[in-house]
Amino acid sequence: MIEIKDLKASIGEKEILKGLNLVVKPGEIHAIMGPNGSGKSTLASVLAGREDYEVTGGEVVFNGKNLLEMAPEERAREGLFLAFQYPVEIPGVSNMNFLKAAVGEVRKHRGEEALSAKDFLALVKEKSALVELDGQLAHRAVNEGFSGGEKKRNEVFQMAMLEPKLAILDETDSGLDIDALRIVAQGVNAMRSPERSFIVITHYQRLLDYIVPDVVHVLYKGRIVKTGTKELALELEEKGYDWIKETVA
Amino acid sequence: MERVLNHSIQKWLDATLAFDTIRHQNHDAVLASMESLEFPHSKMEDWKYTRTQKLNQGQWVLQRSEVISDPEFQAVSSVQTQMRSGFFGCLNQVAPTEAFSLDIAPNESFDEPFHFVIKSNEDWAWTQPSFELTLGEHACAKVVLHFIGKHNGFCNALLDVTMMEGSHLDLDIIQDNDDSFFQILDIRVDEASKSHCNVLTHTLNGGWTRNNLWMSLNGEHAHAALSGFYLPQDGQLVDNHTVVDHRVPNCTSNELYKGVLYDKSKGVFNGKVFVRKDAQKTEAYQSNKNIMMSDDATMDSKPELEIYADDVRCSHGSTTGQFDEEALFYLRARGLSALGAKQLLVSAYVNEVINRSNNAEVVTFVKQELSARGRIIADEV
């Protein structure tokens, strides 16, 4: 699915990713944990194509293609989805117009026919139910006036609409209460399939009770320093990150 | 009597001589007032940012417009518009090429809009349509002035609106001119107490467009809403000069002009709000926002507030900048092209103005037109 080799990335003069390696196979869920400032969100941003970051080394192969050469929209059309840590409010742009344009682009890229208005609305209904998103929200402006929980549910709703091959959830659990967390996880779990992979970035083990990962990585100072099973997350929850820092040092 | 006119305007007046079928009731006074005028140039405060040379060099031939009205209206031959102080307003009054007068009787209310399409079809055609609109007490109407200027022409239009107590007007101006067309539109609105006027200027296209809108709140509890959008591209110019004159207490005004400027285009916004000494409890809001789509486009925005009363709520603001990069990235991360994402953002940006119109037909028409031209993405679903 995705193969990240020796990835190095900087913002301004500061190097944040310092040679990161990661392979995610189809159907797998990988969790990436790590202390603040370790590079988790940078990794998500670099993979999605945010231009603020400069890739200074390494390569990323996504379904056999060079991901780093693609514009953000090409990555999305190829099946990469980033659920934003801070979804952007876009006043005046309705969720529906936005989604219709996005779904249209992705389907066109896959060589699929455009959805009729009726089929599109049916899809919206089905997928918004998945994350218990109020039907009215779909008609409002993108994320405008949404609560924190609604924004995150809207991200998972968009993911369900776009049916990506690889979804990166960037701290989707931050700012969620336990009910919203359960709903978001339920949406993600409904989308699990042997062809779809997930990279779940989180600070806390709590989310991983709901979205059970196949592999857990610890990111520290721009590198993956430890890899294990879901029990590693439990161990981190119990002991914190200090023992990892000591091991690395 | 021999008049002494500045030579810069003599040729313009000479060109009107052949046209005298329609007469302003103050024709002689207008002519006399022109003795102190000269052709507008950039050293005049009102014309500081808008170049007039090309207009002045045109080989214009004064002629009638083609006016299609629905419901059908007879043109009139006598004009009573208020005297103007500027050159082009006077020029219109010296020789209007056609004149229409619409009187809505007191308490009359029309749901169907009065729609005027004013067309200019030929190269070097110079037209000077004149409109007078009067709403009696508690009358209610929607009016659309839809200008279509073809080829290399010049339309110098004038409109007077007189609103009696408690009347209500929705006025939509649509400007849809060719890239080589010049248009000046001078509107003056006088509002009596409790009247409500909503003016929206939709500048769809045009080579060179100058709009003067003067709204005077003369009676208490009157409300003026004025808005407009412009999306100039290539070397086009759109200049909106507005004045809101709060003359009496307890009136409100709300102004919103938004522009998206492409290529080497130029935009001008000059919005004055006067709050006279007696106009206590005035609420006046003004906003001009611009998005620059190119490094070569320019925008001159000048909001001006002059407040002589002490118990008022007024605000004005002007912003000029680029699109929010975060929003662009968010849309692209969902598969929209950079261009598609910008179009979606432009649509939302412009829709805020278009949606201020109370004329559903105009809203639909304008959105469809802009979308057919690839300027915005029409609402779907």
Image (cartoon, coloured by chain):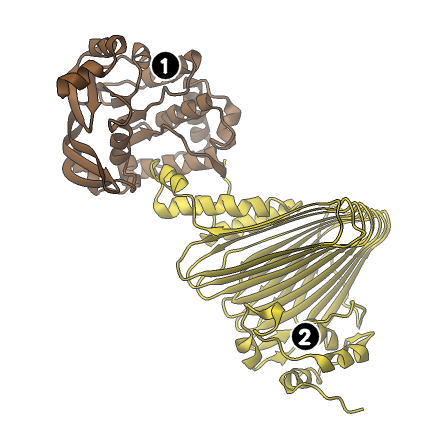
Q: Amino acid at mark 2?
A: Phe
Residue B95 lies, with reference to residue A199, above or below; the image says below
**Residue A214 appears in the figure:** no
Residue A32 lies, with reference to residue B330, above or below; the image says above
Q: Quadrant of residue B24?
A: bottom right
Horizontal relation, residue B176 to residue A223: left or right: right
* Residue occupied by mark 1: A186
Q: Residue at x 45, y 23 (%)?
A: A148
Q: Chain of mark 2?
A: B
In terms of depth relative to the viewer, which is nearer, A62 or A9? A9
Query: Considering the numbered disc 1 on the image, is that residue within a helix, a strand or a loop?
Result: helix
In terms of depth relative to the viewer, which is nearer, B32 or A175? A175
* Residue occupied by mark 2: B87
In which quadrant will I find the C terminus of chain A?
top left
Q: Amino acid at mark 1?
A: Gln
Q: Residue B338 location in percent, x, y?
A: 35, 46
In terms of depth relative to the viewer, which is nearer, B81 or B49? B49
Q: Quadrant of residue A152?
A: top left
Q: Residue A56 location in percent, x, y?
A: 17, 41
Q: Residue A3 location in percent, x, y?
A: 15, 29
Q: Which chain is yellow?
A: B
Q: Chain of mark 1?
A: A
Q: Residue A30 location in percent, x, y?
A: 22, 19
**Residue B5 appears in the figure:** yes
